[in-house]
Amino acid sequence: MAPSVGRLVTAFGSATGIANFIFNKACLQGLPALSLLRSVATHTFSISPEAPEDGAGTNHNEFQRWDNGGGTFHKSACIDPTAVVEIGAIVHPKSFVGAYAHIGSGAVIGPSVSIGQATKIGYNVTLCSCTVGDLCVIHNGVCIGQDGFGFMVDEHGTMLKKPQMLNAQIGNHVEIGANTCIDRGSWRDTVIGDHSKIDNLVQIGHNVVIGKCCMLCGQVGIAGSVTIGDYVTMGGRVAVRDHVSIVSKVRLAANSCVTKDIKEPGDYGGFPAVPIHEWRRQIAKSRNL
């Protein structure tokens, strides 16, 4: 097939010449065998070489190969020469990548994203509408900066999407486990404080503010607009409802559910979460029933 196409191109001078012959030659219009070829030609030769390669109007020709790792970057991006962008990763326009940062294969660094010094971005990470501080570790499959889950029903019963226009801010020395999702803000930025550590498969909703040195174990789910202080620890599968506040130095037992503000430091557990000694009494009583 390939040599035959090559001979046709040689005969007609170009691929466009082949298309013109197929469409304009009257004797070929009634041949069913050429109907598929005419259909393919319609889609193939109608593509303009100047057409943008993404929905934002950025021309693909403005992307270049990064020598230190073989990845792809836009010419308007600012990347430190010591940074590594592995093959298959892409850095979009006006992004910043700091010194000694490492971006793994398959990662997508969206427009205007900032990545701090010596931060490691794992495979297939997606960053958009966010900043990531220095010395962070973002494990494989993490998504940061996508729209939060915000909808409303208007007077006609139509479901409408609330605008999600702000950013997510990740502090310094933060570690985020695989396949965790952190939404960007709608009325305030989503913030993860310095030195906080987040396990795999954690969901953090829009407008959430988490303080410094917090620890979130696997499958924690935090709904939108929650405010969490410093040194808060959440066991596995803890759930936090929207618009509540948790003071600093709180520890939540696994599978707890926070349904109202926690205003005093200490240990909590249960559904709804109560002080740990009260929860233990509830468990003891339930066993005697």
Image: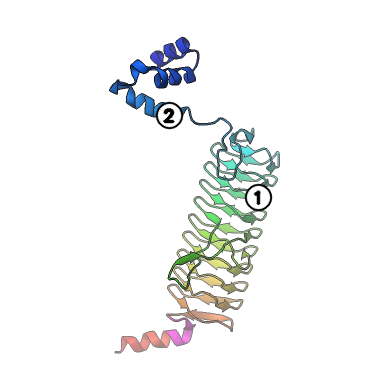
Which amino acid lies under the numbered mark 2 shown in the image of this protein?
A: Thr
Instruction: For mark 1, give the secondary structure.
Output: loop
Q: Is residue 65 visible?
A: no
Q: Quadrant of the C terminus?
A: bottom left
Residue at x 48%, y 71% (from the top left corner): 154
Q: Position of residue 16 (x, y in %)?
A: 48, 20
Magenta stretch, residue numbers: 272-279
Indicate the colouring scheme: rainbow
Which amino acid lies under the numbered mark 1 shown in the image of this protein?
A: Ser
Residue 275 is inside the magenta segment: yes
Q: Quadrant of the N terminus?
A: top left
Please say if 262 is above or below 131. below
Please say if 102 is above or below 150. above
Q: Position of residue 131 (x, y in %)?
A: 65, 55
Residue picked out by circle 1: 112
Residue at x 47%, y 27% (from the top left corner): 45
Instruction: For mark 2, give the secondary structure.
Output: helix
Question: Along the line of sight, which residue is nearer the eye, 100 or 57?
Answer: 57
Residue at x 43%, y 31% (from the top left corner): 43
Please say if 259 is above or below 108. below
| Residue 82: image tag | none
Is 119 positioned to the left or the right of 150 in the image?
right
Q: Based on the displayed image, in which of its 4 quarters is residue 156 positioned? A: bottom left
Q: Position of residue 276 (x, y in %)?
A: 48, 83
Q: Nearer the viewer, mark 1 or mark 2?
A: 2
Please say if 182 is above or below 122. below
Q: Based on the displayed image, in which of its 4 quarters is residue 104 positioned? A: top right
Residue at x 48%, y 59% (from the top left corner): 200
| Residue 42: image tag | 2
